[in-house]
Amino acid sequence: MLKKNDEQARWAHPATASLHAGFRSDPTTKAVCVPIYQNTAYELEGDLSKIADVYNVKEDGYTYTRIINPTTRALEARFAAVDNAADCLAVASGQAATFTALANLCSGQPGDNVVASPFLYGNTWNLLHNTFRRLGIEARTAGNSDPAEFERHIDDRTICLFGECVSNPILDPLPLRNLVEIGRKRGIPVVVDNTTTPLVCRPARLGANMATYSATKYVCGHGTTLGGLISDYGNFPFHQFPNRFPLFSGPDEAHGGILWPQAVQEVNDLGKSAALLKARMTWLRDVGACASPFNSFQLLQGLETLHLRMRQHCESAAAVAEMLEDHPKVVRVTYPSLFTGRKKELADDLFDKSYGYGAMLMFEVSDAANGRALIENIEMLYHVSNVGDARTLITHPVSTTHTTVPRETRMAAGINDGTIRLCIGLEHTEDIIRDLERALSAVN
Ligand SMILES: *Cc1c(COP(=O)(O)O)cnc(C)c1O
């Protein structure tokens, strides 16, 4: 069974957890900020049988930074408290987070498959549809508009339902509650990528079982550091489904025939999530996509102000969306607060309105030439195809990220010739609006 994270009970508000959870001060110097433990190995001190216990996952302890590091562990504990997770595992990047989270659920038997939304970050789409396929893991696509389609694709080797809370870049909301219902009924975990809406969407409250984050984006917040985080909300009993998840109950040869449900009881700090203990001690150990201590330190700095920044990102994005809605040269604006019908219901259910509706939005000018003209006339905003920078980023997908995608395919996904993508930063809202208005005046 999973132990409740004490931190979660202690810090009710993310604002407080992001400053206090997981670390008080350095035990020897009393330094208040989490020190950067820039080291690879740890001295093996004392009783040799105790040291063996650490290696055999019978006791907590530090062995090697590829597997565990104090700076990174402080980030994990702190983020777990912020995200209402039982525990969290930090890795090298968002891609490493998705890879590790999903690979960890595989049985290794033929037929392992993931049922996923079609609207995925491009590299995640590639990971699922090309790289995983080469490893014998199949990705099946089910549309967000018809949750029953997810259920139709499920079989006895389905390891999870997967999607982005609101997809990057086309902002399609995931029918998360429906997926959670299907998952509960069929005994399948729901894993979401919540990269673009940390705190704005709270997967734990909506019943998701795990989440992956590219911490590179809003957790870092300043465009300086790559990182990934996996949250386990501790609400999926993997060991109760030995046929679907044999490695979560039977002996796991990847760690000397260990029984994870037992091991997780024996350790304390690492005993809050069997899934993440297994991921750390096998996948992270073997693949080596660990977070660097310096990057963990940078992500801890970002995490401290995440709640303030997300509020401002959302508030400015809503103001920009409103301005664009009323602009005569703008054909269409896509922003979750402006959705209607079912999509609006989904967005309202996904987002905590005390924050808003996220920082990403799309709008459309009449054609590709005008899309290019707009970008060429931007002065302050950065022409960058990233997400979650403190600066506002703008792109014309047809001239950049989607140049090689066939026209029909991208149009079906909502990327038209004149589509412009914005990721609103932390500049004063009036300055963002002024720059966009100036660029729009150059458009026909
Ligand atoms: C950026 C991004 C990723 C990949 O993260 P990296 O840290 O760049 O590896 C995954 N999912 C989403 C939604 C992203 O925006």
Image: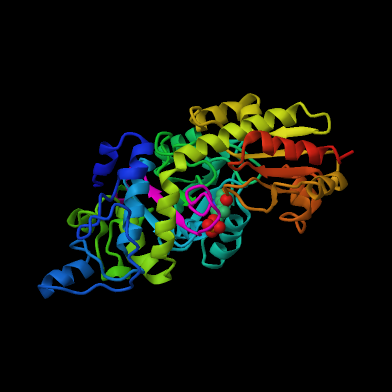
| Residue in view at x 68 percent, y 32 percent | 321
Residue at the far right: name it. 444
Residue 388, percent from left and from top: 57, 48
- Nearest the viewer among 80 and 239 is 80
For the residue pair 235 and 369, the one nearer the viewer reads as: 369
Q: Where residue 256 appears, x then y in whole percent?
A: 26, 71
Q: Is residue 414 left or right of residue 88?
A: right
Q: Is 359 part of what is drawn in magenta? A: no
Majority secondary structure of magenta residues: loop
- Where in the figure is residue 206, as x and y percent of width and height? 43, 34
The residue lying toward the viewer, choosing from 254 and 276, is 276
Q: In the picture shown, does residue 11 fall above or below 287?
A: above
Q: Residue at x 29, y 74 (%)?
A: 41
Image coordinates of residue 402 in percent, x first then y, are: 74, 54
Tell me what residue is drawn at x 40 percent, y 34 percent: 205
Q: How is the image coloured?
A: rainbow
Please give the name of the residue rendered at 45% of the width and 49% of the height, measured from the top-left corner. 302
Position of residue 83 in the picture relative to residue 318 (left or right): left
Q: Nearer the viewer, residue 371 or 28?
A: 28
Task: Residue 188: tell me if it is visible.
Answer: no
Taking the image as drawn, is residue 294 in sight?
yes
The magenta segment is: 214-239
Total numbered badges shown on the rendered structure:
0
211 relative to 78 in the view: left or right: right
Assign ligand 1 to one image quadrant: bottom right
- Quadrant into which the C terminus falls: top right
